Image (cartoon, rainbow, N blue to C red):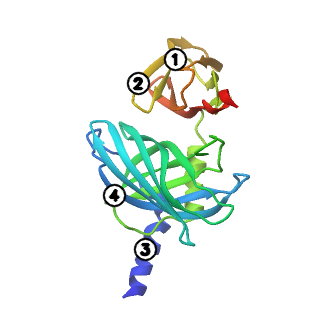
C-alpha cells in the first residue's frame, strides 16, 4: 500500500510544473492553517542550501491578515513569529515582525521573512507560494532569503528543481522593477522599463493597505524610467510594496525602510 501511495505522490509532482494555476476568487478567505516548505538560498543565492517545514496560522478580517508562522529545521530547531499583512486579489502581502519564541543552535539565527505570495488553485489544492526575502530582527540586515510553498492540505512538497523551474519562469517577465537603495533610510529610487507605448502609473502600498501614488498615470514611450519615493514618516521602520502599472498589467517590488541606521 505504501508503494502505491509513494508512486501516486511521484506522479503528482512529476507533473507539478504542468498543472494550470487559476486565480482564486477575491472573496477567498485564507483563515486557517497552511503547511508546507520554505526553500532557503545559499549565501551566493545561486542555489538552495536548506529546506524547512513552514506553517502559517492565519486569521482574516476583511482584507487584513493577522496571525503567526512556525518554522522548523531538520535538527529540531524552531521559531514562532508573529505576522501581519493584507489580501489584494489573488496576492497575499505579508511580513513577520516579531520572533515570539525560538530555539537555535550556536551560530544560527532566525530571520524575519516577508513577501508577496500568489494564491493559486492547483487541482483540488489551494496554494500560497512565492519568493520570501528575509531580514535580521535587530539590525534589519538582509538574510539569504528563499522561496515558500504552503497549502491547506498536507501533501508532498515539490523538489528544489521544480521550485527553481517556477522561479525561472517568474524571472522571465519582460518588465523588471528595482529599488536602490533597498533597504533605505530616507528615500529610494524606483526604476523600471517599459517595452511598448502604454499608460503607466506607480503606487507604493504599506502593509496596512494604504496606497500612495508617486507617479500619476501618463502614456509613455518604450524606455527606462525612474521615480523617487520618500515616506511621510522619516523615523519608522516599515515595509512597502511598489506597484508599477503598465497598461492592464501590474508589476511589484518589495522594499523596506530601515529606521535603525539613523541612530547608529
Dot 2: what SS? loop
Residue positioned 39% across, 84% down in the render: 4
Residue named by callout 3? 9
- Disc 3/disc 1 C-alpha distance (Å): 50 Å
Residue positioned 51% across, 42% down in the render: 115
Indicate which label's residue lies in the foreground, 1 or 4.
1
Q: From the viewer's side, name the closer residue of 176 and 45.
A: 45
Dot 3: what SS? helix
* Residue 132 locus on image (x, y percent): 54, 47
- Disc 4/disc 3 C-alpha distance (Å): 22 Å
Is residue 22 visible in this depiction of the protein?
no
* Residue 262 locus on image (x, y percent): 66, 27
Residue named by callout 4? 33
The mark nearer the N terminus, 2 or 4, is 4
Residue named by callout 1? 232
The mark nearer the N terminus, 2 or 3, is 3
Q: Is residue 222 left or right of residue 241?
A: right
Dot 4: what SS? strand
State yes or no: discs 2 and 3 in contact (Cβ < 8 Å): no
Residue positioned 51% across, 11% down in the render: 218
Mark identifier at residue 80? none
State yes or no: discs 3 and 1 in contact (Cβ < 8 Å): no
The mark nearer the N terminus, 1 or 2, is 2
The mark nearer the N terminus, 4 or 3, is 3
Mark identifier at residue 210? 2
State yes or no: discs 1 and 4 in contact (Cβ < 8 Å): no
Q: Residues within 10 Å of mark 4 (few under 14, many from 20)?
A: some
The mark nearer the N terminus, 3 or 1, is 3
Q: Quadrant of residue 184?
A: top right
Amino acid at each position: 500500500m505504501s508503494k502505491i501511495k509513494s508512486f501516486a505522490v511521484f506522479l503528482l509532482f512529476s507533473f507539478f510544473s504542468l498543472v494550470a494555476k487559476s486565480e482564486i476568487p477575491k472573496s477567498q478567505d485564507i483563515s486557517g492553517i497552511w503547511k508546507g516548505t520554505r526553500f532557503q538560498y545559499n549565501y551566493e543565492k545561486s542555489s538552495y542550501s536548506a529546506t524547512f517545514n513552514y506553517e502559517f496560522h492565519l486569521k482574516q478580517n476583511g482584507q487584513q491578515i493577522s496571525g503567526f508562522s512556525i518554522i522548523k529545521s531538520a535538527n529540531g530547531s524552531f521559531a514562532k513569529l508573529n505576522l501581519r499583512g493584507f489580501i489584494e486579489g489573488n496576492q497575499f502581502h505579508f511580513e513577520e515582525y516579531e520572533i515570539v519564541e525560538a530555539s537555535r543552535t550556536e551560530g544560527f539565527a532566525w530571520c524575519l521573512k516577508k513577501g508577496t505570495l500568489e494564491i493559486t488553485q492547483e487541482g483540488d489544492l489551494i496554494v500560497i507560494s512565492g519568493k520570501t526575502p528575509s531580514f535580521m530582527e535587530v539590525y534589519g540586515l538582509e538574510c539569504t532569503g528563499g522561496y515558500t510553498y504552503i497549502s491547506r492540505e498536507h501533501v508532498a512538497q515539490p523538489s528544489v528543481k521544480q521550485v527553481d523551474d517556477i522561479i525561472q519562469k517568474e524571472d522571465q517577465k519582460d518588465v523588471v522593477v528595482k529599488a536602490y537603495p533597498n533597504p533605505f533610510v530616507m528615500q529610494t529610487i524606483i526604476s523600471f522599463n517599459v517595452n511598448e507605448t502604454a499608460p503607466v502609473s506607480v503606487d507604493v502600498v504599506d502593509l496596512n493597505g494604504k496606497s500612495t501614488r508617486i507617479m500619476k498615470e501618463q502614456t509613455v514611450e518604450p524606455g527606462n524610467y525612474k521615480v523617487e519615493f520618500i515616506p511621510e514618516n522619516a523615523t519608522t521602520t516599515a515595509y512597502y510594496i511598489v506597484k508599477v502599472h503598465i497598461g492592464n498589467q501590474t508589476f511589484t517590488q518589495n522594499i523596506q525602510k530601515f529606521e535603525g541606521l539613523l541612530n547608529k
